[in-house]
Amino acid sequence: MDTAAPARLDIPGDRSPPRRAQMLGYASGNFGKNVLASTMDFFLLFILTERWGISPAAAGLVVMTGLVWDGVCDPLLGRLVDRSTDRLGAYRRMLFVGAPVVGIFFSIFFLRPGAPGSLGQHAIMAWAITIVLLFRSAYSVCDVAHNALMMQLTRTPGAATTVSGLRYMFSCCGTLAVAYCAPAFVDPDRDGGHALVVVAGLAAVAYVVTLWLSAAAAPRSMAVSTHAQNGSFAWIVGNRPLLMLLALALAQALTLPVLARSVAYIGKGVIHDAGWTGRALATLALAQLVTLPGWMALARRRERRVVLRFALVAIAIGLGIFAAGPATMIAGIAVFGAGNAGLQMMIWILLADAVDNGERRTGVRLEGLPVALLLLTLKVGGGLSGALLGRGLSAIGWTVGQPLVQESRDLLLTMAWSIPLVGALAGLAIVLGSTPARLNRPAAIA
């Protein structure tokens, strides 16, 4: 049974449509976030194995530990901000204080801890895990705050599509920046490692500046519930659109990142061209950026479930093209990227829908907790995905400085497309198994 709606204190104007400048300022934070997130997603495993000499299986464990810890922190933070009487003030403070801390730990990670060979494997592992955990703890604070702010900008019809699309456009631009700087990560010791330090420092600065801009663009007023919000468990369990979204998010986070994370290894071990990695990542980002306006237009006119089907089918087709052979891999990455743009955009639209659904059912608006649960799902899935790739690299015999035999190269390519394909098909099954009522029809254009 739905909880009776509590009394609410509505601040005048809290339902007015957000201004375009405000949405752009907020969405710009995704540029800095994605510069750091993409760098860690694409190159953390590679840096650990190729620069620090950690075995792929152990490096995968570092990736998994960091992301799982980050994800576990998210619900705790989300619960705290939902209990705050000044959520918007809490969001801004978390961003203004947390962003520089994130930038510092990110930059420290790319500084060599001593001369090459001066530290043993255990010391390197301890250092890597410590810095990654510190970085992920601070990143979690800013991630929850920034994503929860979106819920305050999507309370008018059509705003969720616009804000989600703008966010992902800035994310694609961040990925493009990382792709442009890929040689610094694929060949981290060139120029004595100075290029890597400079690129990492610039990425940290971009993160701080754009997160501060997001905080400055945040709304100044919001609707406040006088309810004590003790029924959050029932709010979550009874929110079927949210549960469906979490299942979809887990399926894609566990599998789809394997393709992008494999690109650096494919460039080095299969193509034998470090520049190919940058071209592949640039293709991925450009395909997402170019097709995103089309996905936004489609999301305004078609049911959520239809848009998700199109996106997942496009991802599967792209993986099939990639699997056809080296000559078609870049084309496959482009089609995969086009589909992934639609999927990632829709995930955040569906989250806004789920938050609104929970408020309609119960009269209580939770923002931090559902955002944190989605982030937990994405990060735990991504962490397990990193561990899976690390084990796979060990299984095929990847060794630093040693060329791959043909069989191992074939296995690497197969792993890069087959695991994401399983995720795309699983996501498609989740979407097809949902009822239309759980995926609301598109709202009016903002």
Image: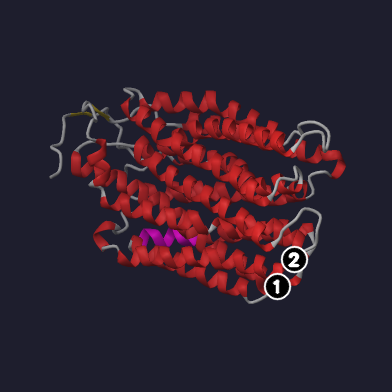
Q: Is residue 183 left or right of residue 219?
A: right
Identify residue type, mark 2. Val
Report if the CB atoms under discs 2 and 1 are less than 8 Å apart.
Answer: yes
Residue at 75% from the left image edge and 33% from the top image edge? 111
Separation of residues labelled 2 and 1 (CA atoms)? 9 Å
Q: Is residue 299 magenta?
A: yes
Q: Residue furthest bottom?
A: 324
**Nearer mark to the viewer, of 2 and 1:** 2
* Residue at image mark 1: 326
* Residue at image mark 2: 270
Residue 174 in view:
no
Q: Which residues are magenta?
A: 293-301
User: SS for tag 1?
Assistant: helix
Residue at 25% from the left image edge and 46% from the top image edge? 237
Q: Whole-percent x and y of residue 318?
A: 56, 70
Q: Is residue 241 magenta?
A: no
Q: Which quadrant is home to the N terminus?
A: top left
Q: Is residue 116 left or right of residue 6?
A: right
